[in-house]
Amino acid sequence: MDDAVKRTIAGYDIIAKRYSKKTLIPEVRQFEHRLLDRFLTMIDVEGSRILDIGCGDGRDTVYLQERGAETVGVDLSAGMLAV
């Protein structure tokens, strides 16, 4: 694995809790939900399988699941996944 990728992963591991907390700001979540909702209008949600690459703390993975899409999230940062 490239050193820059390793440094990026280590950085996200360190800031995972703070990053996750900052993205819980209602205005941020509303904006992200609007983007995800728009994406969902472009696909047939029933029976859709979505791979959320770089899912971080999984908040978008869960949102997509709640909307009926079979969704799996993956991330290289163990710290983000732990959150």
Image (tube, rainbow, N blue to C red):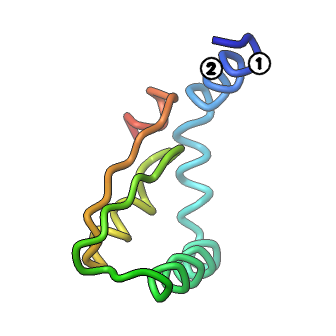
Question: Residue 81, percent across and down?
Answer: 40, 37
For the N terminus, the quadrant is: top right
Residue positioned 54% across, 53% down in the render: 21
Circle 1 or circle 2, nearest the eye: 1
For the C terminus, the quadrant is: top left
Question: Residue 57, percent across and down?
Answer: 45, 47
For the residues bearing labels 1 and 2, Cβ distance under 8 angstroms: no
Which numbered marker is on residue 4?
Answer: 1
Residue positioned 55% across, 73% down in the render: 29
Disc 2 marks which amino acid?
A: Ala
User: In the figure, residue 9 lies in which quadrant?
Assistant: top right
Q: Is residue 69 left or right of residue 7?
A: left
**Residue 44 or residue 35, whichever sits in front:** 44
Badge 2 marks a residue whose secondary structure is helix
**Residue 77 or residue 70, whichever sits in front:** 70
Classify 28 as above or below 74: below
Q: Is residue 65 left or right of residue 16?
A: left
Question: Residue 66, percent across and down?
Answer: 27, 74
Residue positioned 31% across, 62% down in the render: 49
Disc 1 to disc 2, C-alpha distance: 10 Å
Classify 34 as above or below 15: below
Disc 1 marks which amino acid?
A: Ala
Question: Residue 44, percent across and down?
Answer: 35, 82
Q: Which residue is labeled 2 in the image?
A: 10
Q: Is residue 14 left or right of residue 4?
A: left
Query: Looking at the image, how many numbered discs can be counted on the residues?
Result: 2
